[in-house]
């Protein structure tokens, strides 16, 4: 829906750049959404938003990026998409967490301000 709004605004406002409709659909989920969720519900519930994050990442890597590459190259290759997906640091981190968390491996990374919170 937002893509079509972007397409309409692109024509109406005569914006230069063929990627404008894609920019209208973009959301800064990770930097804004996760921090707002943590502020509203507490850091002990931050894992719940990771489930939504995984769905959002799947959408970005398998639909959004495919559409952008198709726009740029006039074709999108599934193999190229899978390779980009597998190399994404976010996807690697999500899968590492899914695999390592049930094994009981302790979190070796600490939040920089843990010492301030007691």
Image (spheres, rainbow, N blue to C red):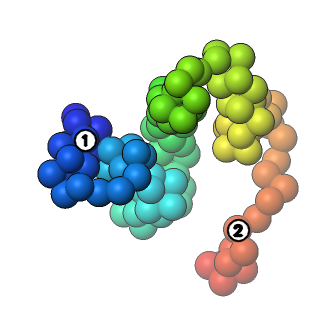
Q: Residues within 10 Å of mark 1 (few under 14, many from 20)?
A: some
- Asked if residue 99 is positioned above or below residue 41 in the image, the reply reads above
Q: Residues within 10 Å of mark 2 (few under 14, many from 20)?
A: few
Residue 64 showing in the rendered view: yes
Return the residue at label 2. 111
- Asked if residue 100 is positioned above or below residue 14 in the image, the reply reads above
Q: Give residue 70's position: percent from left, percent from top.
A: 52, 27
Q: CA distance from mark 1 to mark 2?
A: 42 Å
* Earlier-in-chain disc, 1 versus 2: 1
Q: Nearer the viewer, residue 101 or 4?
A: 4
Q: Is residue 23 left or right of residue 85?
A: left
Name the residue at 54% across, 35% down: 72
Query: Label for residue 7?
Result: 1
- Asked if residue 73 is positioned above or below residue 29 in the image, the reply reads above
Give the SS element for disc 2. Answer: loop
Q: Give residue 17's position: percent from left, percent from top.
A: 40, 52
Q: Which quadrant does the N terminus fall into?
A: top left
Q: Is residue 1 left or right of residue 45?
A: left
Name the residue at 73% across, 44% down: 89
Name the residue at 25% across, 49% down: 10
- Asked if residue 28 is positioned above or below residue 79 in the image, the reply reads below
Residue 58 showing in the rendered view: no
Give the SS element for disc 1. Answer: helix
Q: Give residue 60's position: percent from left, percent from top.
A: 51, 35
Q: Nearer the viewer, residue 64 or 6?
A: 6
Mark toward the viewer: 1 or 2: 1
Q: Nearer the viewer, residue 68 or 17?
A: 17
Query: Label for residue 83?
Result: none
């Amino acid at each position: 829906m937002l893509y079509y709004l972007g397409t309409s605004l692109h024509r109406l406002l005569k914006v230069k750049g063929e990627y404008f409709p894609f920019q209208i659909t973009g959301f800064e989920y990770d930097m804004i959404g996760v921090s707002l969720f943590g502020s509203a519900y507490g850091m002990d519930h931050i894992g719940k938003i990771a489930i939504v994050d995984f769905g959002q990442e799947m959408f970005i890597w398998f639909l959004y990026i495919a559409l952008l590459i198709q726009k740029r190259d006039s074709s999108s290759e599934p193999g190229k998409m899978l390779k980009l997906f597998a190399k994404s640091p976010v996807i690697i981190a999500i899968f590492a967490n899914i695999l390592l968390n049930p094994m009981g491996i302790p979190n070796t990374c600490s939040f920089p301000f843990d010492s301030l919170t007691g």
